Image (cartoon, rainbow, N blue to C red):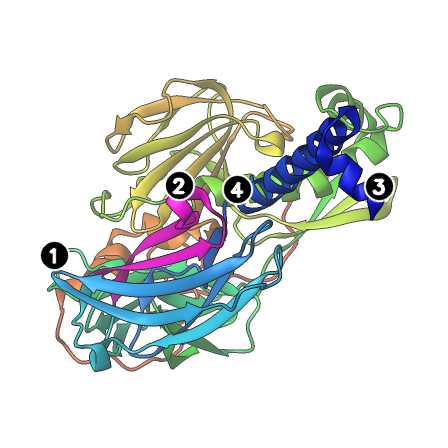
Amino acid sequence: MADIRKVFRGGTGSLIFFALLALGLVGCLIWLVQGRLDQAPPWVNLQPQGEVVGSKTAFTLEAGDPDSGLKEARVAITQGNLEKVVLNRQFPPGGGPGAKVELPFTLEPQALGLKEGKAWISATVRDRSWREWFQGRTATLTREVTIDLVPLNLAFLSVNHLLHAGGTGVIRYRLNKPAKESGVAIDGRFFAGFPQPGGPQGEYVVLFALPRETPGTVIAEVVAKPGAGPPVLQRVTLKINPRRWRQDRLNLPDNFLRRVAADFKVANPGDPLSAYLEVNREMRKANHERLRQVCSQPRPQQLWSGGFQRFLGKSMARFGDRRAYMYQGKQVDSQEHLGEDLASLVHSPVPAANNGVVVLAEPLGIYGETVVLDHGLGVFSMYSHLSQIDVKAGEEVKKGAVLGKTGTTGLAGGDHLHFSMVLQGEFVDPLEWWDRHWVKDQLEGQWKKAGAPAPPVKAAAAPAKAGKGKKAKARPAKRARPPQ
């Protein structure tokens, strides 16, 4: 006690003691202030990320604060002058800093007095820091949403009745309100629908590729996906006439293999056969994927008019040919031919088959110099092995306009045009599209007779030639050269 009294009486020791005590108090104050004036703000997130609120939609508020912890969380939805609080949570002092908080809640717009249309969801969280004049830091997330209260209804209207394997199907359907996405799912592929040309509001049409291999009866699903909730669908049974595809044997001469190994970038150019197989298999797959990407954003309007113009040349290979590639008497590969090979004079002008917009005008692997036209409603035409391209991407062309000249670029063994018809990235038989009667009756006839009852779905003979109803016989096709 005597020593402590001496300290308080004065002297050097007392000054040191008080100085240390003051420093300690200042340090404690700094530590306390820094602890309450945290460096990182709180964060907030709202799941799911969708922009549509249905009649009953579940959400989860995710939030946290790395330093002082959360103090409160609030979620409100606003429509016009009406604001409704749907979540208001206070957190006790000492809540775990840095801990993630998950708060589930459910929005029921009708119970809150909200209507269909636009609204805004705001989520705000506040931490326990002394910043903002002891009110704490805040983080706010605002999202515009659409309140969707009316269930989506779908009604099947009609389908074209002339169906054969590898051809084109056309289905009309009606929706009571716009959907997030609608169309037809068949054979593992989805084909988007478009507003029916010249039709009433709410009626749609979808053109889709029929499977090339079919047991005769196939189920197509007409699907519509609302902004919120599960999709609605109707199943339609399609009777498709099977096709007997031609069998083709192509011999691969050494000089052709060496040319392929020299012209294409391959892993082993010193082995011409391996180089050819790499190009014929892997590059073919990559080219088809590239084509799907090019065809993924079609124009929603019909651009074509009437039947598609056929290039005036001799038919050298047909759509759907099953090709066996032979080398030194042995089969080394097999592929499907997905277009029509047409040969005329060397470097013949190639006309546009119909009105459209150029979406690709560049080399495309095995197809060489290629032009692709968008004709609207998911319909595309493709012109390959050109020696010269006379158009550019984005250019509008009319039926008969010259796109370029025939050639031998890509995996071609002689001067010719490879012509394909493509629906949203899937190849279909061009013979139908060359037949103006088929285009008029089976395609345009579907939406021009809007409101008529759906015709019976029945099988039809697969035409061997445009405009004729004979079946294609299975027979080997003679080839003097190995085209792609």
Q: Which mark is residue 198?
A: 1
Q: 194 or 255: which is nearer to us? A: 194
Q: Main secondary structure of the magenta part?
A: strand
As shown in the figure, which amino acid type bears the numbered disc 1? Answer: Gly
Q: Can residue 235 be found in the magenta stretch? A: no
Q: Specify whether residue 160 is in view.
A: no
As shown in the figure, which amino acid type bears the numbered disc 3? Answer: Asp
Q: CA distance from mark 3 to mark 1?
A: 105 Å
Q: Which residues are magenta?
A: 119-147
Q: Which mark is residue 381?
A: 2
Find disc 3 in the rendering and name its residue: 3
Q: Residues within 10 Å of mark 3 (few under 14, many from 20)?
A: few
Q: Residues within 10 Å of mark 4 (few under 14, many from 20)?
A: some
Mark 1 or 4, nearer chain start: 4
Give the vertical position of 421 relative to 117 (above or below): above
Give the vertical position of 9 relative to 195 (above or below): above
Find disc 4 in the rendering and name its residue: 37
Mark 1 or 2, nearer chain start: 1
Q: Residues within 10 Å of mark 2 (few under 14, many from 20)?
A: many
Task: Between label 1 and label 4, give the one nearer the viewer.
Answer: 4
Disc 3 element = helix
As shown in the figure, which amino acid type bears the numbered disc 2? Answer: Ser
The answer to whether the residue labelled 3 contacts the one labelled 4, judged by CB atoms less than 8 Å apart, is no
Q: CA distance from mark 1 to mark 4?
A: 65 Å
